[in-house]
Image (cartoon, rainbow, N blue to C red):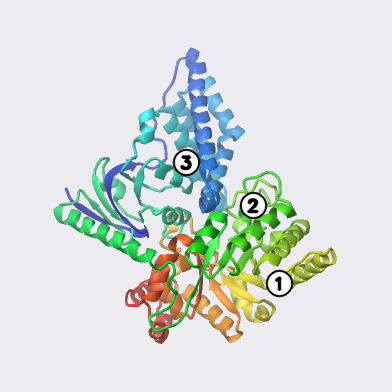
Amino acid sequence: MRQSLSGQGASRGTVLGRARVRLPHALQIAEQHIAPDAADAELEHLHRAIATVREEMHALRARLHGALAQEVGEFLDLHALMLDDPELLHGLDELVRDRHYSADYALRVQRDRLAAVFEAMDDPYFKSRVEDIDQVIGRVHAALHRRDCELRGFAGEVLVAESVAPAEMAQLQAQGVIGLVTTGGSPLGHTAILARSLHMPLVVECSGALDRINDGDALIVDGGTGLVVVEPGADDLRAHRDREQVHVREKRALARLRREPTRTRDGVDIRLFANAESQEDVAEAHSLGAAGIGLYRTEFLFLQRAALPDEEEQFRAYRDVVMGMSGRPVTIRTLDVGADKTDRTGLALRDEPNPALGLRGVRLSLARRGLFETQLRALLRASAYGRIRLLVPMVTSVEEVRLVRRELDRVAADLRSEGHELGEDVPLGVMIEVPAAALALPAFIDEVDFLSVGTNDLVQYLLAVDRNHEGLGRLYTPLHPAVIRVLRDTIRLAQRHSTSIAVCGEMAAAPDYAPLLLALGLTDFSLHPGTMLEVRQRIRDCDYARLQSRLPALLRARDRDAIERWLATA
């Protein structure tokens, strides 16, 4: 029977496929016992399953590069650590050998034990790790019962689930999943970001999907509108084919924009910079006509490794990025590990009670002066090969800006005395991603050369909402009046001081938000190359003067619904 379900579109595209329904990870397994003399065989079966999962994660990790290497790799590494946790492994062995539980039931009991420990903690961050436990246990449980044919069982299917972990995304696509529908999630969470990078349609917050969709149902999923049609009729299929043809035409039209200017209908030029963290990203940004690199993340040099990169390794990496952009400016962000970024080097503290508010960004750099000096030396040496701008994350006070400036000047003097060639000028900028920095900006804006607004963290800290919390997806939104006002005030202050300012968070990468940012006065965007052409097209459809005239109406909006209505008529 035909049904129509609505959710939030999180990754554009429309697909037609069969439903594969995955119920929540909690294992509903009745108590099962084995004969005492069967314990060794049961343990061997369990250990083989664990080894299989370990090998799968290792193989997937090895295939990743660029943005996926960081985003997916962080979660894979965390899951690998959990899989090797002695507490988990010893507990499973004890349950099978001493209590004679089946491998299935031992997994369920041990999962419940570990989950109870995390759920009893006061810190919300650690409570949220229960989902990672479920993911790891779920992988092992699936491996226990897997047949070879099941590895190909997703081809042409749409996965319907409560949630999808970022670590699963690349693997699901490799197995043939063509679309995703989840009852939880957020359009701005890690999974949604990865879905957009993989060009996989995704609908989140689709209430009732698990109750109303069955395995094998035909589904049409529209990741732009959030519409899910179950068992579509003839009219639905015709409409789907029409949308597919429109999508093909749009892709062809977008391809023609590679060399076109990013200019509004009334002639205002807008600069599109690229976010990057690999040579592949840099090459794509160059081919798309990016104005430069607006955010080069240096974390990929430090993460997923036991030893720190030395000055020469960093220098070569930064030099290659600069040369790859052929004279266009490259903004390199200093190290920002901590929070949800997996770190094996020992730089970040292991047992911080709240990592998102802990030793990260500029705090870590100033606490590890030797590390910071090495990175600055590499960056400054690379400046001889092109236009480098230095961007400092997680700044909260003018004192931090002054300390960084002094360190930068000292290192530059040392390098020149050693005979190194440096660029004539290396501008120093800060990220506005902490509310304190936005509020205190009038006190130190004259001490920086440029600004970059990281909306992902800014929204998270302003609203006190974890953007990856499955139960709070609706609350995490840049379309909150407080966010709009902070952005307006920050952009206006930068313009008064003739200080360049860009937005480099996911907000800049969403074509639908482009009119709002233009209305606020933004003229520099920094975004992943994968969405650059879509944003360019949206900007070319906009009338800058008209949007500016509608800014008072936007600022009068009292809630998200009112802001969405404003956007609908932009």
Name the residue beneath numbered marker 1. Answer: 401
Q: Earlier in the sequence, mark 2 or mark 3?
A: 3
Q: Earlier in the sequence, mark 3 or mark 1?
A: 3
Q: Secondary structure at mark 2?
A: helix
Q: Residue at x 26, y 57 (%)?
A: 244
Q: Secondary structure at mark 3?
A: helix
Q: Residue at x 85, y 66 (%)?
A: 417
Residue 512 place in picture, x, y as percent:
38, 69
Q: Earlier in the sequence, mark 2 or mark 1?
A: 2
Name the residue beneath numbered marker 2. Answer: 301
The reply to whether callout 2 and callout 1 are in contact (CB within 8 Å) is: no
Note whether 517 is above or below 302 in the view shown. Answer: below
Note whether 309 is above or below 248 in the view shown. Answer: above
Q: Separation of disc 2 and disc 1 at Cα?
A: 24 Å
Name the residue beneath numbered marker 3. Answer: 135
Which sits in the foreground, 91 or 443?
443
Which sits in the foreground, 103 or 499?
499
Q: To which quarter of the image does residue 23 belong?
A: top left
Residue 167 place in picture, x, y as percent:
49, 45
